[in-house]
Amino acid sequence: MSKQYTVAVLVGSLRKASINRKLALALADLAPPSLRLNIVEIGNLPLYNEDIDVDPAPDTYTEFRNEVKAADALLFVTPEYNRSVPAPMKNAIDVGSRPYGQSAFGDKPGAVLSASPGAVGGFGANHHLRQSLVFLNVPVLQQPEAYLGGAGSFFDEDGKLSDGVKPFLQKFIDAFAQWVEQHYKA
């Protein structure tokens, strides 16, 4: 049997009925056996402040960093706010990348999926996030690109994923599994 890779999933929306959280859970269901997706919560992280990131760092910082460090790969699922990532996602990146030289993200293969009820599908957030990931040395899946517009129609009233988007999500998660296998560094 091949290795099973643990994927830390960061969801940029904190809403209870978040489309992006639903998509993250759907991807976990569609993932091949080689991937185990775990959502790492980001909503409880205080805004990054170097003044409080001292020994000892806040417990929430330490727990978050440890969860990300323990993962083999990273998956970012986010909406777009003002042509960028939501504040909780940016804050999680800041917390995880500090203290300088001790980033929890480095060398972990990653992927970005953005979704929005609007037509553009979070294109701005997706690319803005990719810029940060380049700096953090996260090799990011190039294809298929995943900007999902019209995301309000992806789930029925019972939360079931529509058949219209399911084939693309399957293609995306399968490509990500191959990416992780090719770029994982033990």
Image (cartoon, rainbow, N blue to C red):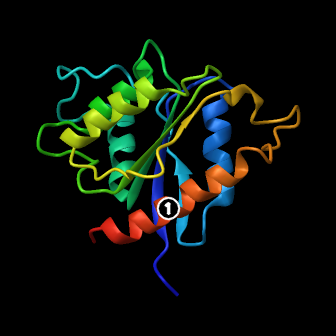
Q: Could you tell whether 85 is left or right of 122 in the image?
A: left
Give the SS element for disc 1: helix
The residue drawn where x is 48% and y is 83% is 2
Q: Position of residue 69 (x, y in %)?
A: 32, 54
Residue type, numbered disc 1: Ala
In the picture of the structure, the residue carrying the numbered disc 1 is 175
109 relative position to 136: left or right:
right
Q: Which x, y percent locates residue 97?
A: 23, 38
Quadrant including the C terminus: bottom left
> Residue lying farthest top?
82
Residue located at (54% from left, 24% from top): 120
Residue 177 visible to the viewer: yes
The reply, left or right, for residue 137 in relation to residue 162 is left
In percent of width and height, residue 157 lies at 88, 31
Q: Report crowding for label 1: few under 14, some 14 to 19, many 20 or more residues within 10 A (C-alpha).
A: some
Q: Is residue 38 above or below residue 13?
A: below
Q: Nearer the viewer, residue 74 or 63?
A: 74
Hey, which residue is sitting farthest right in the picture?
158
Residue 115 horizontal/vertical position (percent): 57, 31
- Looking at the picture, tell me which residue is in the foreground, 131 or 92: 131
Asked if 166 appears above or below 91 in the picture, the reply is below
Q: Quadrant of residue 125?
A: top left
Q: Residue at x 55, y 54 (%)?
A: 172
Q: Quadrant of residue 179?
A: bottom left
Q: For the image shown, how many numbered marks are present on the structure?
A: 1
**Is residue 44 in view from this perspective?**
no
* 172 lies above or below 84: below
